Image (cartoon, coloured by chain):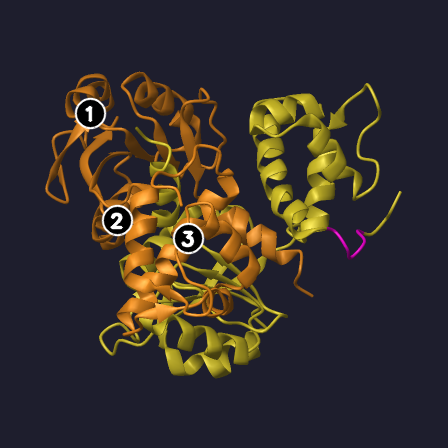
Chain colours: A yellow, B orange
Amino acid sequence: MHSNPPNDIPDIVIGRLPIYLRALNRLAQDGHEVTSSHELGQLLGISSAQIRKDLSHFGGFGKQGTGYQIAYLEEKLRQVLKVNREWEVALVGAGDLGTALAHYGGFSERGFNITCVFDNSAEKIGRSLNGFHIQSIDDIATTIPSRGIKMAMIAVPAKNAQEVADKLIAAGVRAILNYAPINLNVPPEVRVQYIDPVIHMQRMTYYLP
Amino acid sequence: MHSNPPNDIPDIVIGRLPIYLRALNRLAQDGHEVTSSHELGQLLGISSAQIRKDLSHFGGFGKQGTGYQIAYLEEKLRQVLKVNREWEVALVGAGDLGTALAHYGGFSERGFNITCVFDNSAEKIGRSLNGFHIQSIDDIATTIPSRGIKMAMIAVPAKNAQEVADKLIAAGVRAILNYAPINLNVPPEVRVQYIDPVIHMQRMTYYLP
């Protein structure tokens, strides 16, 4: 058994851990205390063998035949993913989408707190959004390092997204959730995840009659 | 060369085609007429060999040494993905998120038109959202088949999402974009894509110091 996760876990495995965690949260909410790779597999449409293999990277979570203790496995996955703590997040873009993100309760519920908001529009700078004053994009360079913020969401038009990403990275951000429909060029030490719902829609039409 | 795509294209390849299409759109907007697997690879962080292999599933798009004609490749990918037409989409849930989705211009720009909206709240039913009257969830069973709608977005709380999905599928929907933070059980002929930004955030914290 490993007490700390080794560094060579494939990214694709890391990508599935939050999905396991969400399923475990739900089982716990529904009053379950124990689950199995078989039950998780049925909930998620992932084979039970894959789930056992993924979880084995982090040491023995369950005993053969007795299943997984949900509370223990949740705690362990939170620890591995480093979501057993709160994270401060910067939001760039205070348009329709940025406003919806600022008001979305699902982030803070799960430990991601948007604590500063930036926009480049003179009309918006100085206004309040969900309790925070909207700051100028130029303030990224000072506010982000002074608060030690490592995560940001980009909700600006595609044409501004790369410039915003460059400023965020220069200020110390190392993880970006990008809502702009454009791929970002970032150095290898920075992680980017993309949210573009149209891409998901276009992935499904192929299968429609 | 195939004139129609064969049926055995791996889903993971299908999943990359919209990303190629988006990059091509952007290159075209920037005034480019020709590109290469090398240039696309650099834009997207995907190896040029992978890109050539993915595109080879659909016949010869480019000539060795001369690159890809962007307009031709865009048209061909649109055809393969069936996004060279407009799609009607039903939206279920007219809360904060549903409202943001109804107002988001990026869907109709790329051929996905939200043309009906459903909610279960008596306060919301009958009101207008982006020009459409909000209908009762009970109307799914009649409105969706009568319009022949095959795609829907679910923007309701997790506890209602499975029930909504069941109603949509019974009414003929075959592709669902699910914003509720829960995995849906659907029959094999139905495609589901998930949008849960917290999952993406949790996937990045693992790598943060």
**Going 38% across and 78% down the picture, which residue do you hit?**
A137
Q: Amino acid at mark 2?
A: Phe
Are the residues at dot 3 and dot 1 in contact (C-beta closer than 8 Å)? no
Q: Is residue B146 left or right of residue B153?
A: left
**Going 38% across and 37% down the picture, which residue do you hit?**
A204
- Residue indicated by mark 2: B107
Q: Please tell me which residue lies in front, B152 or A148.
A: B152
- Residue A35 visible (yes or no): no
- Residue indicated by mark 3: B60
Residue A146, located in which quarter of the rendered image? bottom right
Which of the labelled discs sits on residue B148, or is there none?
Answer: 1
Please report whichever mark, 2 or 1, sits nearer to the chain's N-terminal start.
Answer: 2
- Of circles 2 and 1, the one toward us is 1
Please report whichever mark, 3 or 2, sits nearer to the chain's N-terminal start.
Answer: 3
Q: Please tell me which residue lies in front, B2 or B96.
A: B2
Residue B50 in picture, x, y percent from top left: 55, 55
Label 2, secondary structure: give it.
helix
Boundaries of the magenta span: A5-9
**Cα separation between marks 3 and 1:** 35 Å
